[in-house]
Amino acid sequence: MLDNRKNKRYRTLAQVRIPHILEGENLLKDISITGCRVESTAYADIKQGTQYQMEIEPESSSKIGNFFLSVEVKWVRSTGYTGEVGFSVIASPKGKHFQRYVDYLAYRSSQP
């Protein structure tokens, strides 16, 4: 499958919270400066085009504090009781934390 993304996505396993929307275990599977993919262990009634505030708890090895992203749902894949959601990033109130985390993941992925 070709990946024609404008910005490279970096794999991660950060925790994600969207209060009252995504319950259960939610993991950030990959992220770039323009979007991300979240895997959830619980069904959520999420509609394409809806905007949310997402809290991300970066991997502890990054030593970067939690940050929030304003995101919009681009796609939803449901497999019964679990699912994946693709988001585009609209804004980051703590932009430095977000950029540092993407930079950390980029550096880590470049290491042998």
Image (spheres, rainbow, N blue to C red):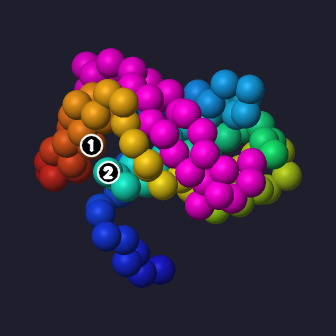
**Left or right position of 63 against 20:** left
Residue 93 vs residue 97, the one in the foreground: 93
In this picture, is 62 found above or below 101?
above
**Looking at the picture, how far across and down is residue 81, in whole percent?**
83, 45
Viewer can see residue 85: no
Q: Foreground mark, 1 or 2? A: 2
Viewer can see residue 103: yes
Q: Residue furthest bottom?
A: 2
**Residue name at image x 74 percent, y 48 percent:** 46
In this picture, is 58 found above or below 37?
above
Residue 50 vs residue 60, the one in the foreground: 50
**Looking at the picture, how far across and down is residue 70, in whole percent?**
48, 39
Q: Which residues are magenta?
A: 46-74
Q: Which mark is residue 102?
A: 1
Q: Which residue is mark 2?
A: 33
**Left or right position of 96 against 29:** left
Q: Amino acid at mark 1?
A: Val
